[in-house]
């Protein structure tokens, strides 16, 4: 595990991230006192087409009650809110 100071981390962040991508853990220190660890996060699992399930309810295309006044014909009086 490598220890770098804050100034060096700010100056060489891109290089440090490359090292982290290759599995290295880097400790960032201020005045010699460790304050953070820079490490790679676990990569998300790749999606596999056809394995996810989508369920569409029977009421999917029913009008929404909060838009009833907009859907009412113009010649019908609208009810107050």
Image (cartoon, grey):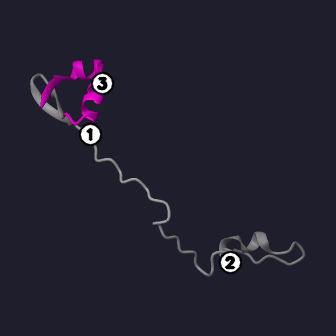
Q: Of marks 3 and 1, which one's residue comes earlier in the chain? A: 3
Looking at the rendered structure, which numbered label has been put on residue 13?
3
Q: Is residue 45 left or right of residue 59?
A: left
Q: Identify the residue at horizontal 9%, vertical 28% (top origin).
A: 33
Classified by dominant secondary structure, the portion drawn in magenta counts as helix
| Depicted 14 relative to depicted 40: above or below | above
The residues tagged by marks 1 and 2 sit, at their Cα atoms, a distance apart of 46 Å
Pointers 1 and 2 in contact (C-beta within 8 Å): no
Looking at the rendered structure, which numbered label has been put on residue 19?
none
- Of the two numbered discs 2 and 3 in the rendering, the one whose residue sits closer to the viewer: 3
Q: Of marks 2 and 3, which one's residue comes earlier in the chain? A: 3
- Where residue 31 appears, as percent x and y from the top left, is 11, 22
Q: Identify the residue at horizontal 18%, vertical 35% (top origin).
A: 25
- Where residue 27 appears, as percent x and y from the top left, is 16, 31
Query: In the image shown, does 68 or 60 lie closer to the viewer?
Result: 60
Which residue range is magenta in the image? 1-24
Local crowd at mark 2 within 10 Å, few (<14), some, or many (≥20)?
Answer: few
Q: Identify the residue at horizontal 58%, vertical 75% (top origin).
A: 56
- Where residue 47 appears, as percent x and y from the top left, is 43, 56
The residues tagged by marks 3 and 1 sit, at their Cα atoms, a distance apart of 13 Å
Return the residue at label 2. 62
Looking at the rendered structure, which numbered label has been put on residue 40?
1
- Of the two numbered discs 3 and 1 in the rendering, the one whose residue sits closer to the viewer: 1
């Amino acid at each position: 595990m490598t220890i770098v100071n804050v100034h060096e981390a700010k100056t060489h962040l891109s290089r440090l991230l490359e090292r982290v991508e290759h599995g290295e853990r880097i400790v960032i220190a201020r005045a010699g006192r460790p304050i953070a660890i820079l490490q790679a996060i676990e990569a998300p699992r790749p999606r596999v087409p056809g394995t996810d399930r989508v369920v569409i309810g029977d009421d999917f295309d029913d009008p929404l009650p909060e838009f009833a006044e907009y859907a009412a014909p113009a010649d019908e009086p609208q009810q107050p809110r």
